[in-house]
Image (cartoon, helix red, strand yellow):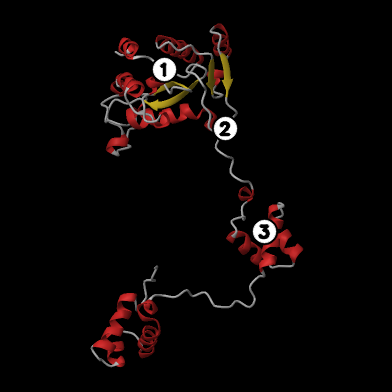
Amino acid sequence: MNIHRNARTTPYSRAEIVRRVLILHETPSAVATALGVSCRTVAKWLARYRAEGKAGLVDRSSRPRRIPRATAADLVDQVIAARRQRLCGKQIAAMLRLSPATVSRILRKARLSRARDLDPPEPVRRYERDHPGELIHIDIKKLGRFDRVGHRITGDRTGQSNARGIGWEFVHVAIDDNSRLAFSQVLANEKKESAVAFLHAALAYYRSLGITVTRVMTDNGACYKSCAFRDACKALGLKHIRTRPYTPKTNGKAERFIQTSLREWAYARAYPTSEHRKDALEPWLHNYNWHRPHGSLQSQPPISRLGHNENNLLRLHN
């Protein structure tokens, strides 16, 4: 119950009115004076209590029992049907001879006021490749370099790292669509040379686990649209797939991995410098791939998707 700030009575004070009059036998006028309400208010709550008991002391809806001039239900249905045909509120009002305010109220109640409300939300389409290596997602995350504990920990934004000329570094990430095995490196830039070098390093990592990569998915960043990256994919026998513009959910596994890495690695500790943060990446990646339970893998680590026996896992584990 949302009682306004100037309310003189609440269910508790109404019960107190009833108690004082019916049990303590105080006069209604004395109770009204003591509680700062009128004698009419005291009489009202006494009458409700006698008629309904404790339930009568609770607030009732202020909605009237009858609304003679309410818009007919069939007219409301016509307004909604016209709106679903993409007519605007004023067109509907003119067509049905209603007030624009009435039409607006009906559409607001039906949650059809905005144009985007007319289109049902696009269903979430989840996909997963059948075997490790069929597709790896590659993306880049830009992080500021720093030489002291950053504002995320201290709250002090004065003299931020990029403002003092320390610059940026770029986390290149790759994640396998089927197994969720991830590989990442912190590089100096996001140019085509770095993208190609990271591609070779990622393929070497997956090859060391017995995974042969056949497809690569990236966004439409300049380094991935470059001829150098195209030629590298061709030389490596990879099919390069680029996402549609402004649809990051297509590359969602990489996006989600970036969120996880920021939360559990990049921003998880108060690193003295960005170099310390960089050094912590490889141990965190090892834990992510070999030990950390993954929600979409029935709480198993990504390495479990490779199907290796215990001897092979011991040979690969380091």
Q: 245 or 312, which is in the foreground?
A: 312
Q: Residue 246 got which mark?
A: 2
- Judged by depth in the image, the label closer to the viewer, 2 or 1, is 1
Res. 164 in view: yes
N-terminal label among 2 and 1: 2
Could you classify mark 2 by the number of other residues whose Cα lies within 10 Å: few (under 14), some (14-19), or many (20 or more)? few
In the rendered view, would you say 75 is above or below 124?
below
Location of mark 1 (residue): 306
Q: Residue 166 got which mark?
A: none
Location of mark 3 (residue): 80
Expressed as whole percent of the image width and height from the top left, the position of residue 42 reads: 35, 87
Amino acid carrying label 1: it is: Leu
* SS under mark 1: helix
Q: What whole-number distance in Å separates the C-alpha atoms at marks 1 and 3?
A: 54 Å
Amino acid carrying label 2: it is: Tyr
Q: What whole-number distance in Å separates the C-alpha atoms at marks 2 and 1?
A: 33 Å
Q: Quadrant of residue 95?
A: bottom right
Expressed as whole percent of the image width and height from the top left, the position of residue 250 reads: 54, 29
Q: Quadrant of the C terminus?
A: top left
318 vs 79, left or right, is left
Could you classify mark 1 by the number of other residues whose Cα lies within 10 Å: few (under 14), some (14-19), or many (20 or more)? some
